[in-house]
Amino acid sequence: MKLIAKKAILPLIAFGLALFVGGLVIGFTDSRVLSKIGSPISFLKIFASTVGNAYLALFQGAIYDPNLVEGHSFLTGFYPLSQTVVNAAPLMLCGLSVAIAFKAGLFNIGAQGQFIFGAIGASYVGFHYELPIFLHVVVAITAAIILSALWGGFVGLLKAKTGAHEVIVTIMLNYIAANFLLWILGTSTFLRPGRLDPLAPPVKDTARLPRLFGDNYSVNVGIFISIVVAFLFWLLLNRSTWGFKTRAVGANSSAARTAGISVQRITIGTMLIAGGLSGLAGAIHVLGFQYELTSDTAGSFGFDAITVALLGRGGPVGVVLASLLFAGLRVGGTTMQANVQVPVEIVLVIQALVVLFIAAPGLITRYIKIKNLESGQEMASKGWNG
């Protein structure tokens, strides 16, 4: 418990400081607040009210909105939470994809492109084939994992055989994947009949992930798949020989090579798994929520995953919690903008601040006494081994 508490200190402080600075940005960019700057008491009151209302709207948009209960049951107010959970599932898997690469000392910036290929595979199988209900889902997910694993494994192969830097390669492959998606949506195979905009046919009902609480809520079995995968992630890294070798390579590849561990195999294998995880995320998003492939299917899942992995400190429990948190920010930001006219981009500011405070803990330790606090860079270079 002490170890868990110690690991949670930096993410909690980073998120708290990010909310604090985000509140300052909200307050000092509001014209009503600035109009009272000549009167200190009035200024502080309206400043606190503006920030408080913004974060209240964020909470209502992400977790519970009492305004939805009118004329309905108490549970109706949890509709925003269902949207948060739906968005958290693919984000969780992408976060694990980035985290497992970090364990091997690699920086997988390509979760976005891997997500796209997973979504393409799931979508094609989902709308093109006629299969029994359970088998259809399994085949669609399998196709997504295989495509994205190959896409990610290609990075590992280049890294292992040529020494190509995985950060540069994955960034370039993200651009290729995004433009490949735009092209393929214009082909006769993927373009929905009667449409000119890039939109694929909807996946068949037999390929859709079952919803858990009826048609009024979007929560589907994808969240359980994500949590099970997070558990398997922990087992793989902490209870298997391959996991030990991966952590050894991440801690010191030269020493691991001297000990007889094949760094090339670990590099290729890790990127295969990382790609498969992101592809599974794409499949869950298409089969469980969106139901159709579009040019914006991937959104920012792959990029947000980097922040999720950092905030979760590369551990499965941390990634699960961080994904729920960031999904809540994503969903609640829309309500915040609608209710109190605070730009949704403030959520991006908060996310960026979280990364800043985690990656540069000197900003924190200079004023707060915390022993043995590691930066995001140090955690990555050590493979985040606890």
Image (spheres, rainbow, N blue to C red):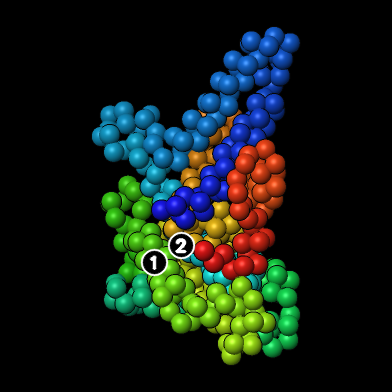
What's the residue type where badge 1 is placed?
Phe
Q: Furthest residue to the left?
A: 73
Q: Furthest residue to the bottom?
A: 260
What's the residue type where badge 2 is placed?
Pro
N-terminal of the two: label 2 or label 1?
A: 1
In the displayed structure, would residue 7 be above or below residue 368?
below
Q: Residue at horizontal 57%, vertical 70%?
A: 103
Residue 312 location (% of width, % of height): 52, 56
Q: Residues within 10 Å of mark 1 (few under 14, many from 20)?
A: few
Q: Residues within 10 Å of mark 2 (few under 14, many from 20)?
A: many
Secondary element type, mark 1: helix
- Disc 2 + disc 1, Cβ < 8 Å: yes
Q: CA distance from mark 2 to mark 1?
A: 7 Å
Residue 152 is labelled as none
Residue assigned mark 1: 231
Residue 337 quadrant: top right
Residue assigned mark 2: 316
Q: Nearer the viewer, residue 304 or 176?
A: 304
Q: Nearer the viewer, residue 250 or 139?
A: 250
Q: Residue at horizontal 59%, vertical 30%?
A: 341
Residue 254 location (% of width, % of height): 67, 82
